[in-house]
Image (cartoon, grey):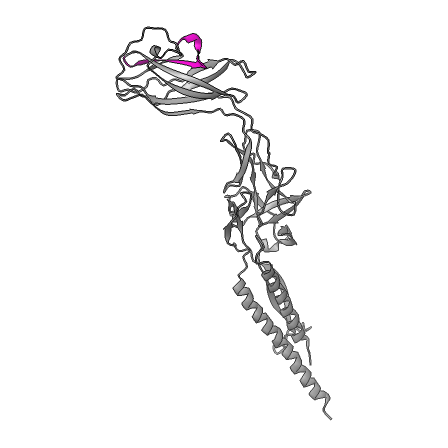
Amino acid sequence: MSFQQSLSGLNAASKNLEIIGNNVSNANTVGFKSSRAQFADIYANSLLGSGKNSAGIGVTVQSIAQQFGQGNITVSSNPLDVAINGSGFFRLSTGGAITYTRNGQFQVDKDSYLVNASGARVTGYPADANGNVVQTAPVELALSTADLAPKATASSKLVANLDSRTTTTIAAPFNPNDATTYHTASGLTVYDSLGNERIMQVFFRRTAPNTWQVFMSEGGTALNGGAAVGTLNFSTGGVLTPATPFNISFTSTNGAVTPQVFTLDFAGTTQFGAQFGVTSITQDGYATGKLAGFSIGTDGVILGRYSNGQTRAQGQIVLSSFANPQGLVPLGDNQWAESSISGQPVVGAPQGGNLGNLQSGALEESNIDLTRELVDMITAQRIYQANAQTIKTQDQMLQTLVNLR
């Protein structure tokens, strides 16, 4: 008699219980992927070929296959937590050694690198000094905490309605401190090269039907020597024509670039029979800004948010996918390594191919189904008991043979 079948059954059931136990123990591990045992029967080889009446000699665990199905996504309080909705993997670097993970619990280390809990650095595409992502070879992503340099205003726009009912004629020279020398006015803030606010005043004076002169001042001092910086001409329908921007120049005594020139565009300004009103004022300059925090978009772009209301791209997280993810080698610490069985990784930005999207401030739970695991545990236990009972029965049969006289 042979106890081989039952012993192999005990070993297989024991291994299955180990796998189930590992799944259950990692039910709360972020990004964990469940495993299952894949069994195969065993037959003895015959020199003359397999016999039709040969019984199998047991079972073996052919492989332990991880299941890379999507886990549930839950919201977290850390904006640097990232969940993948798709089949991609985060690409990590530890001293140049590349590993892969689904665990998006990231933070910034003392050297400003984006890392996971074990210190492995997240890789992605870098951003240049102007915040443009450069899609070259992935590098370890470092997030800058430096202040954002100021930007001098280069262009501005003011859209308003000038009251066509204005008929008062003004003969006196323009004086920004004398309200009788203009009809209406508005404010405009611009920034010099050092990021200082420069408060401008824009004055409008009607000189003829459908014609308005524009004057400007700063701090009570008229620009352009007190002369008009430009003229606005309107059609009989109240439409500005032509809508050509004015070049405005002002001087600085605080060490900023001087003279500073910027354009002032009035496109969209109208002259209707309604009270004067400003519709919008925009300009492209800003003061220096301190880092207020980070956010990560669905495309993996990491944006730095600054106290001056600006944002600047710091880089873009890349994802990797594999033709056969079950061929990846588990390393522990929620990481896998590439193997010849998995195939080479396809690396790219999120939202491309089958890589998936990213969700900031969220984490992917393990894909463990506890109910199923507990049921499988009961089944594995019964199979173990059944194999043990088979050994007991064979032992009794052997004992019977031994007792023959």
How far across and down, in percent of the image, does residue 52 sit? 61, 77
Q: Residue 54 occupies which quadrant of the picture?
A: bottom right
Residue at image x 58%, y 50%?
103
Q: Is residue 249 above or below residue 314?
A: above
How far across and down, in percent of the image, does residue 199 sit? 45, 19
Between 345 and 73, the one nearer to me in the picture = 73
Residue extent of the magenta highlight: 209-227
Between 326 and 129, the one nearer to me in the picture = 129
Q: Is residue 240 left or right of residue 23?
A: left
Q: Is residue 199 left or right of residue 234?
A: right
Residue at image x 70%, y 84%?
398
Q: Please identify the quadrant where the C terminus is shown.
A: bottom right
The outermost residue toward the bottom is 405
Between 355 and 296, the one nearer to me in the picture = 296
Asked whether the viewer can see residue 159, the reply is: yes
Q: Please identify the quadrant where the N terminus is shown.
A: bottom right
How far across and down, in percent of the image, does residue 330 sit? 64, 54
Q: Is residue 399 above or below residue 164?
A: below
Judge whether residue 206 is colored magenta. Answer: no
